[in-house]
Image (cartoon, coloured by chain):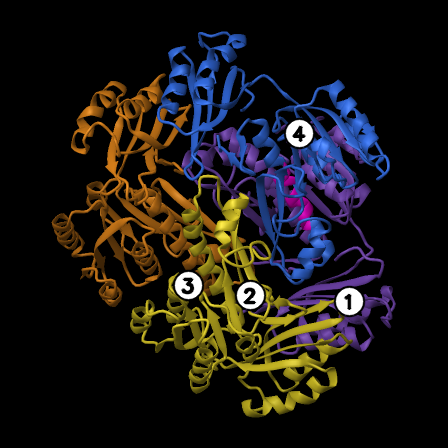
Chain colours: A yellow, B purple, C blue, D orange
Amino acid sequence: MKISDEDRAVILFSCPDRRGIVTEVSHFVSTYNGNIIHSSQHKDEDEGIFFMRIEWSLTDFAIPKEKIRSAFEPIAIKYGMNWELKFGNERARVVIFVSKFDHCLYELLIRNKEGELPCDVVQIISNHEDAREIADYFKIPFACFPMTADTKAETEAREFALMDEKGVDLIILARYMQVLSPEFVDRYRNKIINIHHSFLPAFIGAKPYHQAYKRGVKLIGATSHYVTTDLDEGPIIEQDVERISHRDTIQDLILKGKNLEKEVLARAVKNHLEHKVLTYSNKTVVFDY
Amino acid sequence: MKISDEDRAVILFSCPDRRGIVTEVSHFVSTYNGNIIHSSQHKDEDEGIFFMRIEWSLTDFAIPKEKIRSAFEPIAIKYGMNWELKFGNERARVVIFVSKFDHCLYELLIRNKEGELPCDVVQIISNHEDAREIADYFKIPFACFPMTADTKAETEAREFALMDEKGVDLIILARYMQVLSPEFVDRYRNKIINIHHSFLPAFIGAKPYHQAYKRGVKLIGATSHYVTTDLDEGPIIEQDVERISHRDTIQDLILKGKNLEKEVLARAVKNHLEHKVLTYSNKTVVFDY
Amino acid sequence: MKISDEDRAVILFSCPDRRGIVTEVSHFVSTYNGNIIHSSQHKDEDEGIFFMRIEWSLTDFAIPKEKIRSAFEPIAIKYGMNWELKFGNERARVVIFVSKFDHCLYELLIRNKEGELPCDVVQIISNHEDAREIADYFKIPFACFPMTADTKAETEAREFALMDEKGVDLIILARYMQVLSPEFVDRYRNKIINIHHSFLPAFIGAKPYHQAYKRGVKLIGATSHYVTTDLDEGPIIEQDVERISHRDTIQDLILKGKNLEKEVLARAVKNHLEHKVLTYSNKTVVFDY
Amino acid sequence: MKISDEDRAVILFSCPDRRGIVTEVSHFVSTYNGNIIHSSQHKDEDEGIFFMRIEWSLTDFAIPKEKIRSAFEPIAIKYGMNWELKFGNERARVVIFVSKFDHCLYELLIRNKEGELPCDVVQIISNHEDAREIADYFKIPFACFPMTADTKAETEAREFALMDEKGVDLIILARYMQVLSPEFVDRYRNKIINIHHSFLPAFIGAKPYHQAYKRGVKLIGATSHYVTTDLDEGPIIEQDVERISHRDTIQDLILKGKNLEKEVLARAVKNHLEHKVLTYSNKTVVFDY
């Protein structure tokens, strides 16, 4: 949801499909004098699941903000909803993980600074020192946790402690070259967004540009997805591709890919922050408004 | 709306924006036991206009098809709607106009034959004989009306007579190289779809590929729009582009452009036939479902 | 190479990289008064292979057409070239294989008819009768060879006999849903172009749109490649993608995919027919002129 | 030309088309034992102009760098070439002009820092103070020259003095919202690259996103071009587009456009810095290697 002078609320939910859901949810908003800004629905016919996002202005809304949750709850219970309620003036608290490649980090921080990504980046964490000067420039706390196979569990524990202290709504892996432990992933289910530098499911795993070069593809891709315990197998939020040719060396692929990665990751993060993304069956629904 | 075993209805409307429209329209469908398949809304905040498309299953719907119009009318009047009601098993009656270039004609007829464009092509009209064999192959009536400046009015009158006889919901100008008279355009307001071989508003008028070549652009485009009395100025339904380079001659542009034109025109026609397009202020709202 | 009033020749070759190749080949053309229309080179630095395509006008060329091969041969031997010599007025003899989906077949035949694909389609072969009426309309011989596991070898033998009789430079699998035997593939090495309805190497094998739907990708693709004995593993000539969303059902993917497949296949075939494609290491070099 | 350990030279030229040019230029390189890395040609058949770019390794090249110019000059004179000779280890000296929007400035500086744009940014000039902190972070001299209609001539004179002092090969207008005087443009012919936030020639002049919104286009564009005295009419180097819909407000267009502008400008600058761009007849030849 966009930052606006006017305060807004969003309800995002999925539930078993039944008749009357749209009507009842719309009625909840309009009967208390809320003005619907956007309303979007989707139905997976095969699985019988219904998805909805409704965004409305709180100006003149009869229910005070702090009571909206309890007012809507009976509807949520009636339909068996998996739901969340968000307000336009709440900014997500975000931690960015990065290793040495810093192009995605820069992109996120600049778009954040320019108002395109409505969130507060509360911490940057890296397994290297390289990004510290960038964090300093953008005035964001930076922590370096070098990572070795032996110390992974305890290092992650220190990361958890730091994140608990800060309060974290979203973790972005902006070319973070470490595999997270299953404990890490479970702790932040649907709250970790990664960028993988290939058009998944092609070229899973290490060195996807080398794989792409070897296979002789004519397009390279990038994929942003939620992290699950299966490497590069989580629900895809956004993908895009860029044309290449036989003239492009692996170095060229890496270069072209960088600009693709940062764009794809930024779009995925934006959709998440605007509460437009729902997950189910290892897939996503991404509403366009 | 897609062809389906199950019968469906669509209401498509625009009206001045007011609170409660979504709720009231949704309620109309669900209270009579209709199952909403798709529901899409849009609001132009500057102009204060609200747009909505709602598609529902008629299975179990309590109001018989022939009475839906009168049942919904009070809501339409209350909100001052400009509206239409369509049924899934009604197929639009379409006339295609073509001159000598036949790639768009072929594309439309093949996609129609293969079920992608749900309509009945009831007539092909041309100012040349060239397309007759294509019409024969697809078993569609063909009429040739040669066009000269002197006889334009009377020739168009004959075209009107033929179209009146056939009954026409949509006219497609599939690279028809004659300018329609204002009378023609007025007669079929928002019912004539043209394909212009440029990225409008660049390169209005004759020989857009020659203009594009001369200007040295790096992309060529195609634009499908409703025809108004201002040449190439009507509401745009769909556009797309294709990359070119200094190596491309005018002949290359024409060739690349052909494949672009047929794709863009077919997409625009599909959206129109599925009742997803609304016009206002010389623009379109094109719902994606 | 384009069809032109003026006659042209093309030499296309690869060889181990050495200094002086461009100079010597250019000199061969210009010393005999040939006017170079296009000249394109590429070098794979890792593998040390050099690739070149040179196209020149035969107007005023001092060597008669029938002697060009023997005149160039010493240079080819000196550099160890894998080479071919082609003339602009030679049209490749093409056989198209098709099963039931006919959109790629239509596309190829229409582009051929309109001069975009410079070849003679001498035969259409299918394992079903469905495409016969299309062949008739385009006045191309049609043969139906129903295929069963038991009779595959003998049926292919009959196909070989028919193709030998016709003389075949290129085989196009335009959504032909049978796996060719290794004998078939070996017989027409680098002469069989297939269209696979996914962005290879993702979704190899059967039902790629179903696989794509299940994985929840945000783009679908199509890949045109030379056929090798490893299914869907041959050198890629062309690929492209189309955006989809969670709203698209498998049927929608199939529909969007059809338009992608026909475009990608047509582009690959065009490049092949214009003698712009070289293969090596299971990859292609596709010169853009 | 890419930065490389190995030293390289590039000759880029245009001249009236005659037979034998490729051969003679290739021969010049190979006879002195230069190893050709890339060689690219183009011919405008209508205008009878020939274009060529040849890049070779100086390792083992028999002519010392400082004598290559005079060694090649007789060939240049013979063919009437408009030519330039560049070396891989020479880095262009670049000045960036910017006003308040800083997304293009950031993009250029980050890509420069990461090695993608091989140049030295020697100065940033603005008519506002806003970008000073960015310049400081990247350790580039910053000068603010506020601009008023009355003082334009004298302010530009101060800019010329500063640029003369620094030595300037290329000026980039990275969303610089001032029109340059004809004197400024003449002084740096084919050395000023601008980014215009529309798909030129559509929406020339002020507020192109507002124009695009009003016209209801379905794609927005960005165009990078050399600056001439006709506003937004100079030779186009690169263009690209992004899909929009009726849902996008003017603010959305501005936001989507920013990411397009920075990408298109960076690509144009890269091609220029790699000596791949030639201009003629208000168009460009952009070699892809």
Give the camera-side residue of D188 and C44. Answer: C44
| Main secondary structure type of the part rendered in magenta | helix
Residue C259 lies in the magenta-colored region:
yes
Q: Is residue D268 visible?
A: yes
Q: Residues within 10 Å of mark 4 (few under 14, many from 20)?
A: few
Position of C214 relative to B32 (above/below): above
Determine the CA span between mark 4 and mark 3. Answer: 64 Å
Residue holding disc 2: A225
Between circles 1 and 4, the one closer to the viewer is 1
Determine the CA span between mark 4 and mark 2. Answer: 63 Å
Amino acid type, callout 3: Cys
Q: Chain of mark 1?
A: B
Residue C283 lies in the magenta-colored region:
no
Q: Quadrant of residue D272?
A: top left
- Part of the protein shown in magenta: C256-265
Determine the CA span between mark 2 and mark 3. Answer: 15 Å
Residue D106, position as x, y percentages in the image:
32, 60
| Image mark for residue B56 | 1
Q: At x 55% / y 91%, what residue is drawn?
A: A66
Q: Chain of mark 2?
A: A
Q: Residues within 10 Å of mark 1 (few under 14, many from 20)?
A: many
N-terminal label among 2 and 3: 3
